[in-house]
Image (spheres, helix red, strand yellow):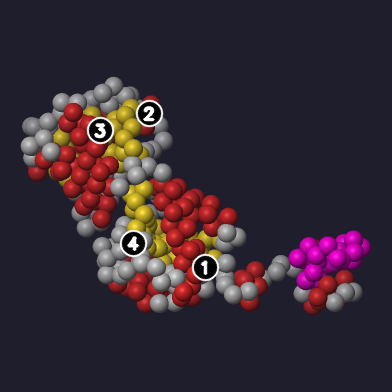
Amino acid sequence: MRDVAQLARVSAMTVSRVLKDDPGVSGATRKRVLTAVKELGYRRNETARSLRLGGSGMIGLVVTNLANPFYSRLALGVQEVAAEQGMRVLLSNTAEQTDRERDLVEDLASHRVEGMIVVPAGSRQEHLAQTMTSMPMVLAARPPAGIDTDCVLVDDFDGAREATAQLLADGHRDLGFLGNPPALYTGAERFRGFWAAHEELGLEPDEHRVRRGLVDIATAEAAAKDVLGGPSAPTALFCTNNRITQGAVRAVRRLGLQTALAGFDNFELADVLGLPLTIVSYDADEIGRQATRLLIDRIKNGTENQQPTRRVVVPTTVIRYGAL
């Protein structure tokens, strides 16, 4: 700033007033300062400025899999609310690795973010407790275990129960299940909803048609082919997330079947596949928005915010595509 002031033949204070759009600076002086700024390539250090004003103006967002469209939608929701509050978002991806999550959280803390939203990689989060002593943290999509903090969840159980109930109401009695790892909250809750829909009709799923621990489209496709290629193939499959549903769609197409599918998370082109498809939909952006509102509330109130931890649950809606 001193260099700009020297080139423009003004004081550093005048440079500061120009950069703040102070209407009291004359047009000629403003033009001279801005010309010097452009010539020198000067950029104000926003991080240092924010720290002087009492905070970095940044929040951290840690997700598990950026390849999954769910997390990009969640991130857009976070960014929307953060921008409304004049804050920026630093985004990191853990690839579902707890050790990497620990390192990324510590790195974000060292960059002086004012708080964090984390989609946990593991089933427990005691390793986040130390960071929470210096800043607020909100969990998204998975509830806290081993720590006490705000969280925003999807109604996983009821969504899975309702979609499975739709398949059963259509007359399907031989249902298969393709699920993500059971250690994950979403995997456990969606399996519980699948099972509950059967129990409500006095039925019990066949464990031979259940495949859990699937992590991507390829493993889901292989599992679907395995289940559908057996002697007692199910007439319908329930899938616990959009990538697993897409793997199942590939398997059904390649086997030349018309197996009915139900799955969590809507995805592009689901409505034009021509397959009987039941989707548990919800607003992933809203998860990000709600988590950011909770976080900013904690940031603004600081140590004075003594209210109990909060849990927000985003509702689901069942959508049906294709010939059912």
Q: Which mark is residue 107?
A: none
Q: Position of residue 141 (x, y in %)?
A: 34, 54
Q: Nearer the viewer, residue 275 or 200?
A: 200
Residue 130 lies, with reference to residue 262, above or below; the image says below
Mark nearer the viewer, 4 or 1: 1
Residue drawn at 30 percent across, 44 percent down: 241
Q: Badge 4 is on which residue?
A: 120
Q: Badge 2 is on which residue?
A: 271
Q: Position of residue 298 (x, y in %)?
A: 46, 67
What kind of residue is marked 1? Answer: Lys
From the viewer's perspective, tell me whether residue 284 is left or right of residue 59. Answer: left
Mark 4 vs 2, N-terminal side: 4
Asked whether the beta carbons under mark 3 and mark 4 sit within 8 Å of each other, the answer is no
| Residue 134, quarter of the rendered image | bottom left
* Neighbourhood count class around disc 1 (C-alpha, 10 Å): few under 14, some 14–19, many 20 upward: few
| Residue 279, quarter of the rendered image | top left
What kind of residue is marked 2? Answer: Asp
Q: CA distance from mark 1 to mark 3?
A: 45 Å
Mark 2 vs 3, N-terminal side: 3
| Residue 117, quarter of the rendered image | bottom left
Q: Which mark is residue 261?
A: 3
Q: CA distance from mark 2 to mark 3?
A: 13 Å
Mark nearer the viewer, 1 or 2: 1
Quarter of the image that includes the N terminus? bottom right
Q: CA distance from mark 3 to mark 4?
A: 28 Å
Mark 1 vs 3, N-terminal side: 3
